[in-house]
Image (spheres, grey):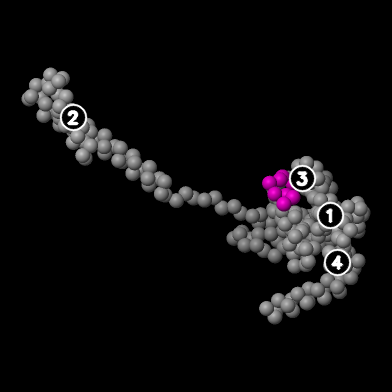
Amino acid sequence: MKLTLWMCLECSDLLPILGCEKAVRPILLEILLIILLLGGFLYFTSLAKSTNYKKSPRKSSTYRKPSQSGAFSSKGHQAKLEPFDAKTTKPLTGAPTLNGAAYIVDGDTVIIQKTQIRLFGVDAPEMNHPYGKSAKWALVRLCKGQIVRAEVSEQDAHGRTVAQCYLPDGRDLSAEMVKLGLAIDWPKYSGGIYRTMEVADARKKMWLADARQKGRMHVWEKYEARQKGQTGKV
């Protein structure tokens, strides 16, 4: 308002210079005052709209992880993932291929396009076994920001699959995990193609996976029972 009055006074000083008659001067001042008030009103209205827009909360897009069978429920809660069932497996004709970002479940299981995939020919430790978390995060680092190509070869009765998975540069994820010392070859399914890639102490580190491959499931079961007992004490 002070600015408006100042501008009106300045204009009134200019009127005699412009040669305006005294009778006309009040009318011109009123017109100038109306114009200035209207301009001020429009300015503050636009300013208020801009401020409200900045303060208004924006709707954030929510990322949903895959809701595949055994992966995530429709409410976004993680459901229990069941391992690949080799007893009900069947080869798939046509070698279907999936491409996409990989959500990592553990060191040898991923989800691509809502399909649970077990890495071909290797065995990584379970999440509650020694080196299980290290294996998972190693696979996360390999797949982060990458489009993974999964060449599906087998499928069990529940739709869970086995696939050879490749990074865009052609690296085989199964081979990479073995070379990192966080997975071991499973000759029964791989034909032994990853055995020479194993690091020296891999089978000592992943003794539970090695025991499973050799059919010594009592070792596995004993470890699981001991872990449950320790959990119950806590």
Tell me the CA gap for discs 1 and 3.
15 Å
Q: Amino acid at mark 3?
A: Leu
Q: In the rendered image, which residue does mark 1 sit on?
A: 178
Residue 154: percent from the left, percent from the top?
83, 53
Q: Mark 1 or 3, which is nearer the eye?
A: 1
Q: Earlier in the sequence, mark 2 or mark 3?
A: 2
Q: In the rendered image, which residue does mark 4 sit on?
A: 207
In the rendered image, the quadrant that contains the C terminus is bottom right
Q: Mark 4 or 3, which is nearer the eye?
A: 4
Q: In the rendered image, which residue does mark 2 sit on?
A: 10
Q: In the rendered image, which residue does mark 3 sit on?
A: 167
Q: Amino acid at mark 1?
A: Val
| Secondary structure state at the residue bearing disc 2 | helix
Tell me the CA gap for discs 1 and 2.
85 Å
Q: Mark 1 or 2, which is nearer the eye?
A: 2
Residue 13: percent from the left, percent from the top?
15, 27
Residue 7: image quadrant is top left
Residue 131: image quadrant is bottom right
Q: Earlier in the sequence, mark 4 or mark 2?
A: 2
